[in-house]
Image (cartoon, rainbow, N blue to C red):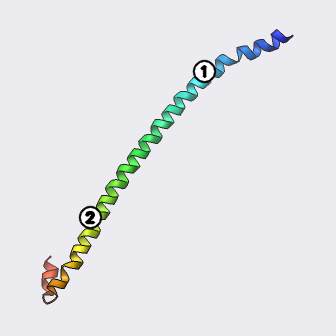
Amino acid sequence: MRPTTYNPSYESPPPSNNSQKSYRILSRLIFVLFVLVIIINISISFTWLVLNSQLPLVTISNFTLPPDHHNHPNDDQTI
C-alpha cells in the first residue's frame, strides 16, 4: 500500500516542476518589468526634479533682479 501511495506523490513532481519552471520564468519577467518601471520612474523623476530645480532658479533670479531695476519697471517687462 505504501508504494502505491508514494507513487502518485512521486508522479506529481514533474508537473509541479514544470509549474515551478514557468513560475521562475514569470517571476523573472515580473522582476525585469519591475526593474524597468523603477528605472523609468527614476529617470522621469530625475528629469522632473531637474526641470523643477531650474524653474525656481529662474524665479529666484527674476526676484533678485527687480530690486536693481525698481526705478525702471519697463525693464522687467522686457526681460
Vertical relation: 42 (above or below) 55:
above
Amino acid carrying label 1: it is: Asn
Which residue is more in the foreground, 28 or 78? 28
> Which of the two labelled residues, at mark 2 and mark 1, occupies the earlier sequence position?
1
Q: Work out which residue is located at the far right of the displayed protein and give it.
A: 1
Q: Position of residue 75 (x, y in %)?
A: 12, 82
| Label 2 CA crowd tier, 10 Å (few <14, some 14–19, many 20+) | few
Q: What residue did someone put label 1 on?
A: 18
Q: State left or right for residue 4 relative to residue 19.
A: right
Q: Residue at x 25, y 74 (%)?
A: 60
Left or right relative to 47: residue 23: right
Q: At x 24% / y 78%, what residue is drawn?
A: 63
Nearest the eye: 19 or 10: 10
Q: Residue at x 55, y 28 (%)?
A: 24
Instruction: Place residue 12 in its image quadrant.
Output: top right
Height in image: 10 above or below 69? above
Quarter occupied by the N terminus: top right
Q: Is residue 34 left or right of residue 40?
A: right
Q: Are marks 2 and 1 in contact (CB under 8 Å)?
A: no
> Marks 2 and 1, Cα distance to the nearest angstrom?
53 Å
What amino acid type should be assigned to the residue bearing mark 2?
Gln
**Residue behind mark 2:** 54
Asked if 4 appears above or below 44 in the picture, the reply is above
Secondary structure of the residue carrying tag 1 is helix
Name the quadrant containing residue 49.
bottom left
